Image (spheres, rainbow, N blue to C red):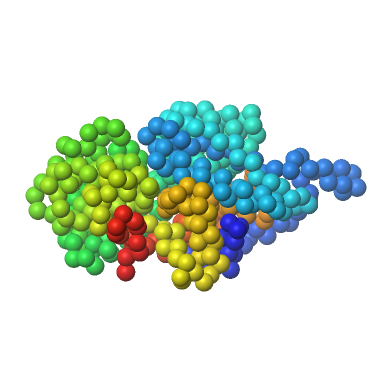
């Protein structure tokens, strides 16, 4: 069952501090609001409904569909599992209902949908935005209307500055953590001179800033940085500029489908050395037939969900990852490492509702920001001072071998 993924006994190093930071807040919330959601005189509960309603805005078409469709699949699998028995919320067992919208990879449409879901449909929380641009559009709406929003996109600015992001949370790893892990990998492979090929937009911006710092601190020479044009345009010229001169490696910082397209263009430009991807590349599209030869042997830094094994699963979280992966493959044929973020978002909200004994938006926010949990994608450690919850210890290194991602040791 997917609910087993959130094993509250699993504490990461960062999680210990997050739990300590949240103690006073949890105590205060417990004193102020332990009543049923609505009561008549005499204490008789009058529930407002029997659902936890989550508004979802995803890129189901357009440039972000390679990632958005994966999230819809993962969420539907997880909701089916949760609804077998329901979620205990106060004196009710609630089912989860998803209100899913296709934002067509358009930030303006994502903002419109978020407003509609928040005001007309009165959802308890928002999830979505696999691109940084659509997530940032939803951020403004969620913060204005004080509804919790769990972003599935990369980009550190989604949750910063924290004073203006009090209802906003991000599930993907921080760019700085990914870049530092990548710098260690480059050193272990004795890769000293690299070029960085970064996507356009906010995700690429975060990658460029983080990679420059991490590579400098790690003693790796960043020879040049080249930005890719928008999805759908030719990457050929950018790839040729990136590989000019002597290089030991090329970092591609982007998301599918850009990552695979960039790899193809780099090979066409004559580059035969190693490629290094950030987590945004880990999607079915990157390993597709058109990209297969170009990405074979490439490395990626990515959370732990790619390492699920039927031979080594021993913990509750590992068993849950295996079960989720099996059900995903059974339904959709292949498994993508990006998919579990959607599952984790639903589980985090369900866990917050259980802990809060309420679906009130403010209480969900209060209990989200103290969560320490082991999810399908990796470990999360939210805190009042940190809303980007993926723990850096969840990151591993993977390599493409025979068309699949395998753990690199």
Say left or right for 203 vs 355: left
Looking at the image, how many numbered discs can be counted on the residues? 0
Which of the 4 image quarters holds residue 107? Answer: top left
Is residue 348 toward the left or the right of residue 235 in the image? right
Relative vertical location of residue 312 with respect to residue 381 in this rendering, above or below = below
* Residue at image location 51% in from the left, 36% down from the top: 57
Q: Nearer the viewer, residue 95 or 133?
A: 95
> In this orientation, does residue 356 appear?
no
Figure quadrant of the N terminus: bottom right
Pick the front one: 230 or 209 = 230
Residue 121 coordinates in the image, percent (x, y): 64, 32
Residue shown at 46% from the left, 71% from the top:
312
Task: Please tell me whether residue 32 is drawn above or below residue 107 in the rendered image.
Answer: below
Relative side of 358 to 114, left or right: right
Residue nearer the viewer, 243 or 167: 243
Residue at horizontal 52%, vertical 71%? 314
408 relative to 124, above or below: below
Confirm whether residue 148 shows in the render: yes
Q: Position of residue 406 (x, y in %)?
A: 35, 61
Residue furthest left as drawn: 245
Residue with the most extreme right position: 42
Quadrant of the image containing the C terminus: bottom left
Which residue shows up at 76% across the image and 50% down it?
92
Rendering coords of residue 171 (x, y %): 48, 51
Measured as percent of width and height from the top left, residue 308 is found at: 45, 63
């Amino acid at each position: 069952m997917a609910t087993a993924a959130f094993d509250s006994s699993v504490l990461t190093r960062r999680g210990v501090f997050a739990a300590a930071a949240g103690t006073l807040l949890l105590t205060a919330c417990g004193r102020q609001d332990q009543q049923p959601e609505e009561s008549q005189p005499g204490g008789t509960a009058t529930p407002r409904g029997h659902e936890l309603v989550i508004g979802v805005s995803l890129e189901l078409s357009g440039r972000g569909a390679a990632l958005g469709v994966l999230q819809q699949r993962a969420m539907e699998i997880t909701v089916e599992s949760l609804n077998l028995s329901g979620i205990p919320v106060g004196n009710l067992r609630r089912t989860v209902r998803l209100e899913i919208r296709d934002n067509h990879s358009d930030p303006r449409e994502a903002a419109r949908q978020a407003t509609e879901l928040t005001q007309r449909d009165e959802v308890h929380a928002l999830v979505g935005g696999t691109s940084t641009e659509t997530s940032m559009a939803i951020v403004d709406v969620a913060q204005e209307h004080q509804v919790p929003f769990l972003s599935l996109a990369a980009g550190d600015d989604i949750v910063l500055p924290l004073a203006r992001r009090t209802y906003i949370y991000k599930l993907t790893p921080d760019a700085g953590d990914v870049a530092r892990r990548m710098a260690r990998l480059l050193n272990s492979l004795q890769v000293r001179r690299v070029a960085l090929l970064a996507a356009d937009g906010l995700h690429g911006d975060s990658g460029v800033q983080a990679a420059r710092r991490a590579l400098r601190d790690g003693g790796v020479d960043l020879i040049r940085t080249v930005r890719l044009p928008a999805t759908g345009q030719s990457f050929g010229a950018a790839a040729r500029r990136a590989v000019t001169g002597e290089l030991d490696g090329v970092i591609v910082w982007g998301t599918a489908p850009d990552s695979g397209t960039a790899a193809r263009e780099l090979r066409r430009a004559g580059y035969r050395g190693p490629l290094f991807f950030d987590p945004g590349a880990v999607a079915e599209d990157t390993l597709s037939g058109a990209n297969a030869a170009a990405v074979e042997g490439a490395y990626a830094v990515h959370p732990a969900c790619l390492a699920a094994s039927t031979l080594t699963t021993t913990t509750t979280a590992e068993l849950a990852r295996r079960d989720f992966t099996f059900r995903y493959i059974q339904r959709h044929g292949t498994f993508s490492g990006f998919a579990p973020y959607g599952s984790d978002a639903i589980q985090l909200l369900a866990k917050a509702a259980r802990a809060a004994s309420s679906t009130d938006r403010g209480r969900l926010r209060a209990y989200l920001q103290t969560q320490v949990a082991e999810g399908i994608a990796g470990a999360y450690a939210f805190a009042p001072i940190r809303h980007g919850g993926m723990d850096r210890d969840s990151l591993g290194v993977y390599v493409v071998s025979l068309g699949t991602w395998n753990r690199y040791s």
